[in-house]
Amino acid sequence: MEKMARVSTALGGNTLTGRTMFCHLDAPANAISVCRDAAQVVVAGRNIFKIYSIEEEQFVEKLNLRVGRKPSLNFSCADVVWHQMDENLLATAATNGVVVTWNLGKPSRNKQDQLFTEHKRTVNKVCFHPTEVYMLLSGSQDGYMKCFDLRKKDSVSTFSGQSESVRDVQFSIRDYFTFAATFENGNVQLWDIRRPDRYERMFTAHNGPVFCCDWHPEDRGWLATGGRDKMVKVWDMNTTRAKEIYCVQTIASVARVKWRPECKHHIATCSMMVDHNIYVWDVRRPFIPSAMFEEHKDVTTGIVWRHLHDPYFLLSGSKDSTLYQHIFKDASQPIDRANPEGLCYSLYGDLAFAAKESLISSDSNRKPYIGDRRHPIFFKRKLDPTEQFEYISSSSALSVFETDVESGSMDWFVHTAKQYALAGRPLAELCDHNAKVAKGLDRNQVAQTWTMLRIIYSSLGTMSSTNLNHSMGKGSTTLPLMNSFNLKDIPSGLGSESRLDRSKGESRTENILMDSSSTLINNEDNEETEGSDVPADYLLGDVEADEDDLYMMDHENPHAEEQEYSLPQEAFPLRHEIVDNPSALDHLQDKADSPHVSGNEAETVSLTPVESFSLISISHSLYENRLPSDFFNPIVRDTLLFYAEQGDVQTAVSVLIVLGDRIRKEIDEQTQEHWYTSYIDLLQRFQLWNISNEVIKLSTCRAINCLNQASTTLHINCSNCKRPMSNRGWICDRCRQCASMCAVCHHVVKGLFVWCQGCSHGGHLQHIMKWLETSSHCPAGCGHLCEYT
Amino acid sequence: NKKTSCSFLSAYHQRTCNNFQVSPPLTRGPSAFIPENEVMQANGLDERTNLLVEEYSTSGRLDNITQVMSIHTQYLESFLRSQFYMLRMDGPLPLPYRHYIAIMAAARHQCSYLINMHVDEFLKTGGIAEWLNGLEYIPQRLKNLNEINKLLAHRPWLITKEHIQKLVKTGENNWSLPELVHAVVLLAHYHALASFVFGSGINPERDPDTSNGVRLIAVNNFCVCDLANDNNIENASLTSSNFGVSVARRFFLLASYFAIFFFTAFDDEIVSTDVSRYVEDPGFGYKDFARRGEDHLPTFRAQDYTWENHGFSLVNRLYSDIGHLLDEKFRMVYNLTYNTMATHEDVDTTTLRRALFNYVHCMYGIRYDDYDYGEVNQLLERSLKVYIKTVTCYPERTTKRMYDSYWRQFKHSEKVHVNLLLMEARMQAELLYALRAITRHLT
């Protein structure tokens, strides 16, 4: 009750008004502090020590405390604090280790009052007792904390942390005798002011220095600490062991923390390095700051709430030599900019989709799907009516869409990946081999591509003597992009609209028209409606040759395709009939332009390879020896781009690797890298580690090449004492024995070491293999039934 | 209660005299300054053996640096760990690059010992042998490092954010920030290590494989100049003016101590041609941070950019984990003590260690507000100051005479300890300047 009364007097008599404003200081600030009446602020730094009054519209400089022509180091402040009981009393901590008190009531220009030169090193922090007028506490780099009585010349008591530098000291707000001190080695100590001999409690709060701490203004047991490890932690000190109750992970080391008045869970932080913003966190929601002030151009060094009981005004000083007053309603709220939708594929092609509930629940027809393990899951949090500053609604709905197992099968991808040959043989052989692989999997189009590549890049010389006209059936690319998903319980709001949107899958037709001297590539985007035939126009090249002269590239199964080859006699556009795709249902395709995401779409190729063929005739006369294979590079490039666009990065990357330098320069580095990473990602999702590694090795991109040089560490435990081995050497630090002994021959294993993950015994690969032929028990005699994969 | 180092050292001060014997350089053992048996017998033998065995088993050799450092086992451990990390573990730079950067750094001080070592490593990790012909043969990207290498090695205070910008934004040869930080850490490490090598008179490795033809013949540059007998340059104002001189003035006087002396003594030095192929602008050397008469220089205020608060965060952000390793190493060397001094035991050497550390920083213009630079004069005798200045700023000029002439009652292990302090202080100073420039570039 008492608190409430004070609020009304403090705020009632003197309501805070103002706006976001700033003023330039002459020098970087190191710390700021406010007067009790919230009307004045003191700014201290290496070259500045001034008092500003906070007016409605601006800051007005009231007093410069740096007097004298050549100010001494005593003025170089690391910290400043304004007494909350006596508005004439200030204390500063100087970088040279001096603690100075200032009395504004002095009549002279020099307001310096007392000088304590007891610390040997920089004083990092000074702190007045919240209720005692004459009690001042300081914490220094030299590892000591000192308590001063301002009526005396020397310190009253000295506290030795017995460890490294003191970074912050704070009197407990409610506990008269208690103060907390934080240290450079990560510890926090609690002291009783009456007992300088020994701390009451100590615990390790952070990894690395603890830069700051702040007692909760209301909850007497809560202490917030911020450290170099980028964490803000809230400790409940009521229990015998300090208990971490909240933890906020920030993006840079935390320089200051300050609880927000009147808001139990809010805390403001600023960082020591790199990040210049001030954040206000709700500690219960540690992943996204609830408010953010982005005004400063350099590191913020001091933050303070303007009034003890007002949560809307925040003052801050910075290295960029400005002093700001931030108003809460001007704060930016990162949550507004955060993308509340998430989309992810599972390994088996299921699609999970999470969105703000308000987006989805606008549709009232939706009912939860019951009886399936994959039914959409909804998260909802009840808003706490007692909460003064409520959360921004954070509930969202998660829907999982199941893939039709059949159509989602990616077997062809795995087979292709395993069987493709990418290097180690002449180009022609590689192409032939890969064409055969593709053919075997009914991917005629890809097979044709490989065959063409062989012709373009390797058989050039020999071709001239064969004197043949080639007419290749080019598998048209009008494969309809088919659904892979049966949407179960798709919210109709999402379902109908987005489905329609997405069903306009592009169907591209690529024709290669070879004129006597020029190359024309004709890409057409056909708007395709669900389940309809795909109209495709084909421009055919000047087919001068007779049907008899046409040389079929499909040696494998000529008659199977023969019926479909209705070879045109004239050179006019011809409409091909496409077999209706029976399984064309819903189309759900995302971002066809990103191979990364669309990896799963590639599967559509395998479903029903509906193909139509256009004919390309390459008459010998067109490209005799004179026509270099470079000539075709643009076509090949477009082909690859096309495949990648379709989601078949596999083909694109494989061709890229096989052709190597022949094509590399045609495609810009970024795109290549993008393909590679997409393909490698896919391979790894299918656990094709060896193949992905091979691809990495063969890639010519620098960024890709070094991928398999990263994270090559394997952490192992010692087989004797079962504790982690330091990463060097064969000898375990702890039990001083060679750790990697072969259980069979009892020698140290250098080279391939295989071990059972159950009992961690193992040995030379050969020995273990031999052993396991005769026994399934562990050769070490531990009785374990070893399992090797 | 421990007696502080002050009292002992002032006593030594009085007794120091200039006529002493200099023993000839030793060619056997790991160091030319320290007798072999001194290196081999040290406390904590068990622990030490283990560490050395481990080092041998991972790197396949036990170089002389490791052997000499092994006098201080605790330190050696963190030294090896951080060196191992920056040379061999995950990092932004490819392995051959790292060794080449080490070569470039060592070449600034003509440290053929380190160069040889890393030429081998460079080739072993698949580096292009052609690069070893000299700086003209390396890619432009590496060449761009020359400027920052030069400045870091000799006058780190000249590094500005413009240098960083130039490296980061030059189109195709640009350095990413993590790469740059990795490179800077390597450069600083090897500049400092060169100080240690010369300061402790590390002998060339004895291993016989000199077949690759790129190995340099160690230049025996033990200087003949007799430094210790030169008394004219004693700066009277330094010793007499401990009172009444402003703190700032004292800092500058100290920073420029011996300035004239070094400029007259070594201006016409010839750089060995073998090393010079890795060096650009060989004439560039340390110049006193504070030239006499210029009082108001932009000193680096230690409190405004400290390793603990700022340097660590930046380095760790851009090159993960190295921050922790360096932090541990700095902490280790700063706090290392056996509470002994010469023949005395149970001595608190904190002030002495701090004086050594801060004196090195002082020569690089890094100033601590909370330090009374008068302490340096009180604690460090003149011959020691000569030694410190030489080892830090012109390591290649260190002589056995310098090494022998200071602290003559002290043990060799203590002198190695001094070298470790100097090395780490120097590395930290270089890092602070480079990282501050990077921070400024970022803001």
Image: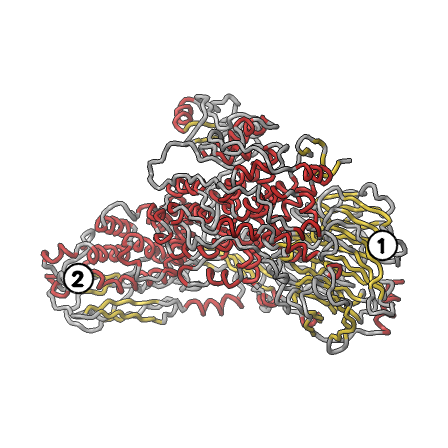
Element marked by disc 2 = strand
Say whether mark 1 and mark 2 are on the same chain: yes
Return the residue at label 1. A174
- For the C terminus of chain A, give its image quadrant: top left
Q: Is A88 left, or right, of A674 in this rendering?
A: right
**Residue A248 in view (yes/no):** no
Q: Name the chain letter of the residue that bears numbered label 2.
A: A
Instruction: Give x and y (percent) for residue B239.
Output: 68, 49
Residue drawn at 62 percent across, 40 percent down:
B332
Residue A166 image offset from top left, x and y in percent: 73, 49
The quadrant of the rendering that contains the N terminus of chain A is: bottom right
Label 1 secondary element: loop
Residue A482 rendering spot, x and y as whole percentages: 39, 61
**Rendered view: A343 above or below B321:** below
Q: Is residue A590 depicted above or below A752 in this figure?
A: below
Q: Is residue A52 left or right of residue B305?
A: right
Q: Nearer the viewer, residue A428 or A646?
A: A428
N-terminal label among 2 and 1: 1
Q: Please name the residue that numbered disc 2 is placed on.
A: A471
Front one among A785 and A263: A263
Q: Is residue B443 visible?
A: yes
Q: Quadrant of residue A21?
A: bottom right
Neighbourhood count class around disc 1 (C-alpha, 10 Å): few under 14, some 14–19, many 20 upward: some
The structure residue drawn at horizontal position 67% and vertical position 34%, both measured from the top left corner, is: B341
Q: Is residue B85 left or right of residue A9?
A: left
Question: Looking at the rendered structure, which numbered label has been put on residue A663?
Answer: none
